[in-house]
Image (cartoon, coloured by chain):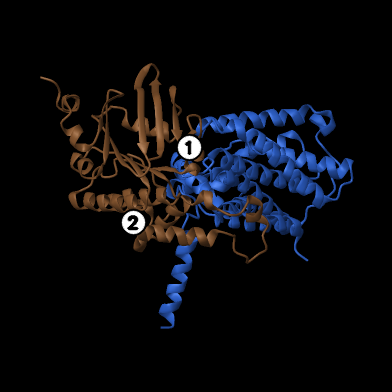
Amino acid sequence: MIDPYIESVLIFVGINAILAYSFFIPMKTNQISGGQGAFMAIGAYFSAAMTVNFHIPFPVALVASGLIAGLVGVLVGFPALRIRGLYLVIMTLGFAEVVRVFFLTSDYFGAAYGFSGIQELTNLSNVYVVLAVSIFFLYRLEKSYLGRAFEAIKENDLAGETLGINVTKIKVIGFGLGAASAGLGGALYAHYALFIDSNNFGFHRSIEMVIFAIFGGINSLWGPVIGAAILTVVPEVLRFIQEWRMIFYGMLIVLLMTFRPEGLIAKHTLQDISNLVRKTKRDENP
Amino acid sequence: MMKILETKKVSKSFNGFRALQDVDLSLEAGDIHAIIGPNGAGKTTFFNLISGVYPATTGAVHFLQKDITRLKPYQISIMGMARTFQNICLFPGMTVLENVMVGRHAYNESSIFKIFLRLPFRKLGGEQRILEKAKEILDFVGLYTQRDQMASGLPYGDQRRLEIARALATEPKLLLLDEPAAGMNTSETEGILELIGKIDKMGITILLIEHDMKLVMGIARTITVLNFGQKIAEGTPDEIQNNEKVIEAYLGSE
């Protein structure tokens, strides 16, 4: 049996990776969201209400909360289209605050007392199944015309539009998929934390997702996973230095951004590494 | 002959500044038509209006006998109009081949659900055809061997070529070229001339903006001259060269 402490770290690595993707996907269409915590909250509260109040099986609740968050994402995505860059960050941040306060005041969801009595239904296998399926879908997306459209919009949306790409539609798809990913992460989180309140999904949470994705690298599919894994494990490994660990964590981010602003995994990093390995092998056995 | 493009008294104002005033233009299918005029005459604004980048303040644009005045660029593109940009707008972080493949976007054959839900190890329908067609187009413009390079790494002249390739990938009926030879040396300009000739032979109507008079006079069959947002002359290269108003606009009166 796997050590329960290690298991819990691994579960958080998986959940955080799914959350990091929720920032990464809209970012692929040049939409920077500072409020993915809102969609995580929607996924967490709705899935909890489904399993606790309606005894809906967890897999169904999980998928449904992803869909609900995705749908809200699509609705928010439309007004978000008109806004770019920093303004979009502020707009999504405001939206996240609206959602947070909604759950803080909604009696149905426990208001300020939070939502308790959630069963522990999240485990290592379902977290990693969701993560694997997400990566598989994203890989397919990248290899399709839709992935090219995402990248085209990111590089030059006007040129993309004159080549027959419906930029509005693609951006809304990107925003919706990101929101759905946050919803899934939220549902998994709720059924592992067992108690949720609105403070779990505030500004801090949204920014954490941004940091995971940027730290790992937002131009590679593997960036968000690597970023989430490192930044989840490092504070655990550093427990022995106690209160100093968060300083170390912060320093790590400062250093990486200074020396490698493109993130740990850049677009062609993995390609380069595999080429290098192949080359070394060739040199060893000529 | 069929009119492929017609503008009816199109005007565009930016905060009160009238960049274009009541411009009428009618373009025959199969023509090579050039729009010339001094800097700031409104040539690029005119391109932006017909390709839907921004709507006309007044007037109407008809393409293939349909009113496209309020359509979005992607809708106009799907109808069969493609364009290049004065300041090159490639996707610099994508390869040469990928740039052209983006131009095939509208020719994808699978819905978003198919992308995610098809069986593993089965190719996405249409993707292979997009790839083949993109390679064919790169071969046509002479960039096939550079297909795996980053677009940003191409020499300037080839970047312009790639932009044309990308526009051709949409299979346009009308191709708008915004200064295709700008900043090019003599041999590169000759290459572009040859390419435009090949595109003309394919039966694609060409509307181009150009500063290089030698290029314009050598290739255009008809010419429109804009000055201060208004059309001041229209005709064959010979007529334009001897037009008083045109000479005045370029050289100044007195």
The colour of chain A is blue
Find residue B218 and report its horizontal and vertical position in percent.
20, 44
Q: Quadrant of the C terminus of chain A?
A: bottom left
**In this orientation, which residue lies closer to the viewer: A228 or B232?**
B232
Q: Is residue A52 visible?
A: yes
- Residue A110 quadrant: top right
Question: Which chain does the numbered disc 2 sit on?
Answer: B
The colour of chain B is brown
Is the residue A167 above or below the residue B156 in the image? above
Element under disc 1: helix
Crowding at dot 1, Cα within 10 Å, few <14 / some 14-19 / many 20+, comes out as many
Labels 2 and 1: the sequence-earlier one = 1
Question: Which disc number belongs to residue B141?
Answer: 2
Q: How many angstroms separate mark 2 from mark 1 (CA)?
A: 24 Å
* Side of B34 relative to A192 (left or right): left
Amino acid marked by disc 2? Val
Find residue B148 and report its horizontal and vertical position in percent.
40, 61
Residue visible at 31% across and 24% down in the picture:
B229
* Side of A185 relative to A30 (left or right): right
**In this orientation, which residue lies closer to the viewer: A144 or B61?**
B61
Is the residue B7 above or below the residue B89 in the image? above
Question: Which chain does the numbered disc 1 sit on?
Answer: B
Amino acid marked by disc 1? Pro
Mark 1, residue position: B73
